[in-house]
Image (cartoon, rainbow, N blue to C red):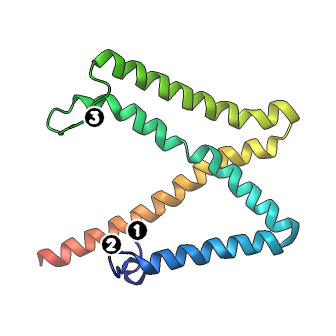
Amino acid sequence: MWPDFVKKHEDGMPKNAMWLQCIVVVVFVGLISFGGEGAAQFFSKLILMTNVAMTIPYIFVAGAFPAFKNKSEIEKPFEIYKGKTIVKVATVFTVLSVSFANITTILSPYLTTGDISSTIWMVAGPVVFTIAALVIYSKYEKKYVEILKTQKN
């Protein structure tokens, strides 16, 4: 999905990608430190957007856990949950607790201080990041299909 320059590995490390990430982080920290109130507000909104967005994948992973446990063709050299009942209990508990945490995190600013803006930003985060991911993936998919077509010819 990234340009070849970014994907290039040296000494077993994606050095260009790491330098790019470093530059982005330094720019963000610099903008926040020296950018005044506007930059600090932008960073606060960005943090609000990631609060819930970062935990949603855990709900999907936890929800997929029983299906993973049922796959006998996957070697599992170390297992903690051996019974099907405990797997289901752990899955339900994890999904419900993370979902409850997300809901309370989203509603808390509005219910405690009437801050609807923070609530909206927390809901907007997963939506914006999902749209961005879908756009990036569709570009990758088109590029991959074109590569496959040229390889077949």
Q: Residues within 10 Å of mark 1 (few under 14, many from 20)?
A: few
Eye-nearest disc, 3 or 1: 3
Eye-nearest disc, 2 or 3: 3
Q: Quadrant of the N terminus?
A: bottom left
Residue 97 appears left or right of 88: right
Residue 68 appears left or right of 26: left
SS class, disc 3: helix
Q: Residue at x 57, y 75 (%)?
A: 22
Q: Which residue is mark 1?
A: 139
Q: Position of residue 92 (x, y in %)?
A: 45, 22
Viewer-closest of 8 and 134: 8
- Asked if 140 appears above or below 88 in the picture, the reply is below
- Label pair 1/2, CB-CB below 8 angstroms: yes
What is the C-alpha distance between the residues marked 2 and 3?
Answer: 31 Å
Q: Quadrant of the C terminus?
A: bottom left
Q: Which residue is mark 3?
A: 68
Q: Position of residue 111 (x, y in %)?
A: 81, 30
- Pick whichever of labels 2 and 3 is earlier in the sequence: 3
| Mark drawn on residue 124 | none
Q: Residues within 10 Å of mark 3 (few under 14, many from 20)?
A: few
> Type of residue at label 1?
Lys
Rendered image quadrant of residue 119: top right
SS class, disc 1: helix
Q: How many labels were placed on the picture?
A: 3
Q: Residues within 10 Å of mark 2 (few under 14, many from 20)?
A: few
Q: Position of residue 149 (x, y in %)?
A: 19, 73
